[in-house]
Image (cartoon, helix red, strand yellow):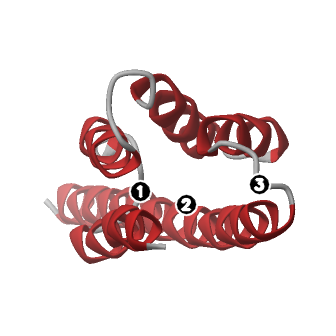
Amino acid sequence: MLFFKYLFLTGIFISAVIIGRLLSRKYKNRAKELKEFKEVLNVLETKIKFTYEPLGEILSDISKMIKNKNICELLDETTNNLRQNNFTIAWNNSINSMSSTLSLNEEDLSIIRSLGNMLRKN
């Protein structure tokens, strides 16, 4: 009986460790994605100020420089959506379709969505 008790406790401990690692991976990926988005915004700001290229070309160039696969896909999808829509609609559609693959929470996504509105105004 004591053996089963320790076996059960060991199983609970191992399960807790696995669940903790899975949850921490999501937060770790979120931090990485936020840093990548910060880098994207810095490069985007610089290219808009100094190159006067169309947004589609700028996003395509940035997606080639970024290491994070999810953000690259987001930028590529936005570039493809720009062919049919303005930037705000293309950006929001891309974020909505990629939100399940990104490790960002809803607050992060709403802040990133607001970028489309700010770029439209400037």
Instruction: Specify which label sits upstream in the sequence, 1 or 3.
Output: 3
Which residue is at 57% across, 73% downward? 31
Q: Residue furthest left?
A: 1
Amino acid tagged 3 = Tyr
What is the secondary structure assignment of the residue under circle 2?
helix
* 83 lies above or below 58: above
Question: What amino acid is labelled 2 in the image?
Answer: Asn
In the image, taking residue 52 as reference, residue 89 lies left or right, namely left
Res 34 → quadrant:
bottom right
Label 2 vs 1, first from the N-terminus: 2
Reading the image, the residue beneath label 2 is: 29
The residue that label 3 is drawn on is 52
Q: Nearer the viewer, residue 37 or 68?
A: 37
Residue 113, position in %: x, y? Answer: 32, 63
Q: Residues within 10 Å of mark 1 (few under 14, many from 20)?
A: many
**Cα separation between marks 2 and 3:** 33 Å
- Residue found 75% across the figure and 46% down from its top: 53
Viewed as shown, does residue 117 lie left or right of 56? Answer: left
Using the image, tell me which numbered label, if any, was put on residue 103.
1
User: 38 left or right of 15?
Assistant: right
What residue is shown at x 66% (from left), y 72% (from top)? Answer: 35
